[in-house]
Every structure is written in structure tokens, then in C-alpha cells.
Image (spheres, grey):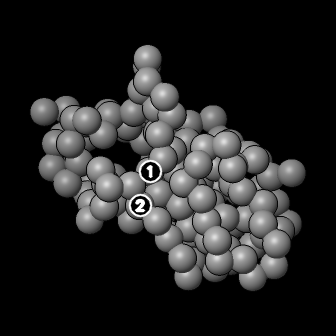
Amino acid sequence: QVQLVESGGGLVQAGGSLRLSCAASTRTFMQYAMAWFRQTPGKEREFVAAINWNGGRSSHAGSVKGRFTISRDNAKNMVYLSMNSLKPEDTAAYYCAADQQGPFATMISTALGEYDYWGQGTQVTVSS
């Protein structure tokens, strides 16, 4: 198993930037593809970005492409989401997720159901 803890959320003005962090408590971090999802009340949890075990592959939702960047630091068991040009519609609870994979995997998924472990979420609020 892996435990995930997000941090870095907060209140920011539209056009501003924020960096979310996810700390993974596991001895096998490189066996996991990592992702960020977000959810607002009354809406389904939606895909934001994902990255494979070594950062060689990544995917970003069309709504955030060019503004958000997912990255990871395997030496620190950390995954990040750098968010720029934030919009009020980016307001949501952001969740870190992990998908256990085989060695040297390059495949990543945008599907919520593919992810095995989830963090508790961190709130991002963007004011206009």
C-alpha cells in the first residue's frame, strides 16, 4: 500500500499561481504512476494530469493544458502540480492518486477507476 498526503492548496486570485505537493509514504514509489484529479460539490471527480513512473510520459486535461504541469521527484517520493494562470473554474478539491504498475511501465491512464490509492484532498479556491 501507499499513503498519499496532499498540501499546498489555498486561496489565490485569478491569474495567480499555486503549487500542490503530494507526499507518498511507500518503499516502492517508482512502481506507481501518479495523477491529480479534482472535484467540486455536486460534480464528478475529474482528471487533471498524470505522470508515469519516471516522468517520461505525462498527460494533462484539455482544460488545464498549457497552464498546469505535473512532475515528480522519485528521490523524495513527491509528485507536484504547478498551476499557473488560475481561473475561478479551477476552484476544487484536488486529490493525489496512485496507480500501481509493473517495472518500467510507460502507460498512464486518465480514468479515475484505474487508480488504486487516494489522498485526502487539498482545497484550491480561485477568486475573481
Q: Residue at x 25, y 35 (%)?
A: 89
Left or right: residue 15 versus residue 109 is left
Q: What residue occupies the far top of the structure in this picture? A: 42
Query: Which mark, residue 60?
Result: 2
User: Label 2 near label 1: C-beta < 8 Å?
Assistant: yes
Q: Residues within 10 Å of mark 1 (few under 14, many from 20)?
A: many
Can residue 60 be seen here? The reply is yes
Q: Is residue 104 above or below residue 82?
A: below
Q: Is residue 67 above or below residue 52?
A: above
Indicate the position of residue 27 as horizontal and vertical percent values: 85, 66
Q: Residue at x 22, y 35 (%)?
A: 88
Q: Residue at x 20, y 54 (%)?
A: 85
Indicate the position of residue 3 as horizontal and vertical percent values: 76, 48
The amino acid sitting under disc 2 is His
Judging depth in this view, the residue of 101 and 127 nearest the camera is 101
Q: Is residue 37 above or below residue 109?
A: above
Tell me how far mark 1 sits from mark 2, CA to CA.
6 Å
Q: Residue at x 75, y 82 (%)?
A: 104
Query: Which mark, residue 48?
Result: 1
Can residue 96 be seen here? The reply is no
Q: Quadrant of the C terminus?
A: top left
Helix, strand or loop for disc 1: strand
Q: Quadrant of residue 32?
A: bottom right
